Image (cartoon, rainbow, N blue to C red):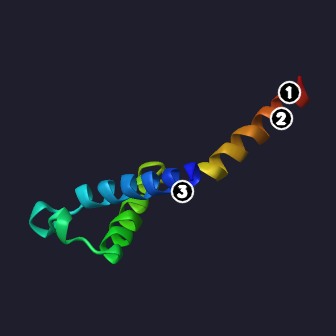
Amino acid sequence: MATALFVLAVVVFFAAVGRSASPAKERMPLRSWTLGDVLTNAARGLRVHASLWQPPGGTLWAEHHARQRAERQRSAGE
């Protein structure tokens, strides 16, 4: 039950982010949303959130591993 509520809260959060990312003229009233609208807005919110964490020159994952590799090489050289 708690897991379902958590998943629902996450979907609603990303749907709200996705809705706020669209221009005000294109936003539908919340009362007229269907399940498809919720999922579309949640997907848009997820893309917006992911783009905030994506650096312009590469992925955070690659940068993290490059930093770890450099630290290991530094510690091995000392």
Inspect the image, locate mark 3, and give the three-letter code of the amino acid beneath it: Ala
Nearer-N-terminus badge (3/1): 3
Residue 46 drawn at (x, y percent): 43, 60
Residue 14 drawn at (x, y percent): 39, 56
**Residue tagged 1:** 75
Does dot 2 land on a helix, a strand or a loop? helix
Residue 25 drawn at (x, y percent): 9, 66
Instruction: Say which of 78 and 26 sits in front.
Output: 26
- Numbered mark located on residue 4 in the image: 3
Residue at 39% of width from left, 70% of height from top?
Answer: 39
State how far apart marks 3 and 1 are (Cα).
45 Å
Residue at 38% of width from left, 52% of height from top?
Answer: 13
Residue at the farthest left position: 25
Residue at the farthest top position: 78
**Residue tagged 2:** 72
Instruction: Say which of 43 and 35 sits in front.
Output: 35
The vertical placement of 77 against 4, above or below, is above
